Structures are given as structure tokens and as C-alpha cells.
Image: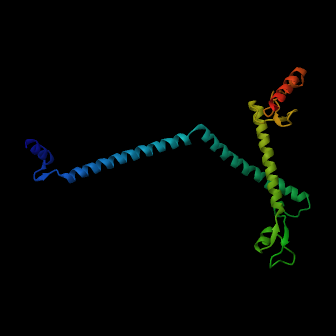
């Protein structure tokens, strides 16, 4: 009986005069503790996610790629302006084009309001609903591509000359499998043949013929 009374007193110990703990208070405390544990777990997961993102974003390779893309975009814009604004206008003057290269087009099907003297600009033809083949824009983009490629090749050559780092990989054809390999390679990566002449020696040729015959069997 005394044990039962002790248990009841522990359940109903006074917090304030006239107030006692009951089962609702215990449930409320358990809910608050569970909410606190869930919040703590959420904070830990968010912190781990943020730390992982910062480690990924601030890696050396990622930053180098980002800087390279920014410089490549700026360099592309520069080369495009060089071709469109500096190189093509003199070509349009020297050749009997009578207009800029990007304004050259051919009308495949005229629009409903074609002028008597024809369309003078590409925009007027397109606004009138004519079907046009804008070959001047295509030629302009081809020249831009060629100019960008030549400029990049020149920069790569200058970098290779200054740093002595072979970033331009020149290739030759393997004399045995006729596939391209690096010109400094001593052995073909495709057919594994030696490229220093030892394959042409009689002893090596016999070994190769024997190995080929054994593999075919």
C-alpha cells in the first residue's frame, strides 16, 4: 500500500499551490522533446548539406572550369566582333556584294506585299512573310567559326611555346593498323605494335606470326 501511495505522490507532486502533474503534462513534455530532437536532426542535415555544397563549389577544379568558361565566352564574343565588324566589311567592299555579308539572301517564295524593286533587306523579306534562304548569315557564322578556331590554335601554340607543355597533340598513322597515334608514341595503342622498327626484324616477325596463329586456333 505504501508503494502505491509513493507512486501516486510522485505523479502528483505539487508544482504550484493547487496544481499537480498529470498525464497530459507528461504527454506534452514528450511531444516537446520529440520536436526538439526532430529540429536538431534537421539542423544537422541542413548543415551537412551546406558543408558538402561549399566543399564542391570551392574545389580547385570547379573554379578553374568556371573561370575557363567565362574567358571562353568573352573570347568568343571578341572573335565574333573581329570577324563581323572588321574583316567582313572590307570583303563586302572589295567584292561586288553591294551590302554586308549577313544581308545576302535569296528569295525562294515572295510574300504577299513584295515591292516592285524586290526586297532590299533580309528583315523586310521576313516581315513580309517571304521564304528566304539567308546564306549570308551562314557564311558569316562559318567565317566566325574558322576565325575562332584559328585564334584558339594560335593561343595554344603560344602557350605551348612559352610553357613547353605539349597541349597540341600531333598524330601520325600507324604503319600496321593505319589508325592515328601520337607522333611521339613508341607503341600503337590500337594494335600494340612497336613503332620503332623492331616489328620489321625477322625474329620479331616470326614471334608475331606464331602468336597470331596461336590466337586464331
Q: Measuring 88% from the left and 24% from the top, which residue is drawn there?
A: 205
The answer to whether residue 56 is visible is yes
Q: Measuring 85% from the left and 70% from the top, which residue is drawn there?
A: 107
Quarter of the image that includes the N terminus: top left
Residue in front for this viewpoint, 106 or 103? 106
Q: Is residue 199 above or below residue 147?
A: above
Residue 179 placement, left or right of 21: right
Which residue is the extreme one toward the front? 217
- In x, y percent, where is residue 209? 86, 27
Residue 72 placement, left or right of 1: right
State the count of labels: 0
Give the quadrant of residue 64: top right
Residue in front for this viewpoint, 127 or 186? 186
- In x, y percent, where is residue 147? 80, 49
Residue 123 placement, left or right of 31: right
Quarter of the image that includes the C terminus: top right
Residue in front for this viewpoint, 28 or 210? 210
Q: Is residue 64 above or below residue 133?
A: above
- In x, y percent, where is residue 161? 78, 32
Give the quadrant of residue 66: top right
Q: How is the image coloured?
A: rainbow
Which residue is the extreme one toward the left? 1
The answer to whether residue 86 is visible is no
- In x, y percent, where is residue 58? 55, 40
Q: Measuring 13% from the left and 52% from the top, which residue is drawn there?
A: 19
Q: Measuring 88% from the left and 20% from the top, which residue is drawn there?
A: 203
Which residue is the extreme one toward the top? 203
Amino acid at each position: 500500500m505504501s508503494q502505491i501511495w509513493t507512486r501516486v505522490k510522485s505523479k502528483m507532486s505539487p508544482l504550484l499551490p493547487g496544481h499537480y502533474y498529470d498525464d497530459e503534462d507528461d504527454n506534452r513534455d514528450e511531444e516537446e522533446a520529440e520536436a526538439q530532437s526532430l529540429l536538431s536532426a534537421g539542423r544537422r542535415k541542413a548543415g551537412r548539406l551546406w558543408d558538402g555544397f561549399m566543399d564542391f563549389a570551392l574545389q580547385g577544379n570547379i573554379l578553374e572550369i568556371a573561370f575557363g568558361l567565362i574567358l571562353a565566352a568573352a573570347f568568343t564574343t571578341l572573335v565574333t566582333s573581329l570577324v563581323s565588324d572588321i574583316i567582313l566589311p572590307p570583303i563586302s567592299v572589295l567584292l561586288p556584294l553591294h551590302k554586308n555579308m549577313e544581308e545576302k539572301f535569296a528569295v525562294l517564295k515572295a510574300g504577299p506585299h513584295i515591292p516592285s524593286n524586290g526586297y532590299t533587306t533580309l528583315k523586310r523579306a521576313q516581315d513580309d512573310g517571304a521564304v528566304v534562304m539567308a546564306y549570308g548569315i551562314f557564311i558569316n557564322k562559318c567565317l566566325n567559326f574558322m576565325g575562332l578556331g584559328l585564334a584558339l590554335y594560335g593561343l595554344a601554340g603560344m602557350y605551348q611555346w612559352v610553357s613547353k607543355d605539349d597541349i597540341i597533340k600531333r598524330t601520325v598513322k600507324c604503319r600496321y593498323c593505319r589508325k592515328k597515334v601520337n607522333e611521339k608514341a613508341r607503341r600503337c595503342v590500337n594494335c600494340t605494335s612497336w613503332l620503332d622498327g623492331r616489328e620489321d626484324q625477322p625474329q620479331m616477325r616470326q614471334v608475331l606470326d606464331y602468336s597470331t596463329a596461336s590466337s586464331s586456333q
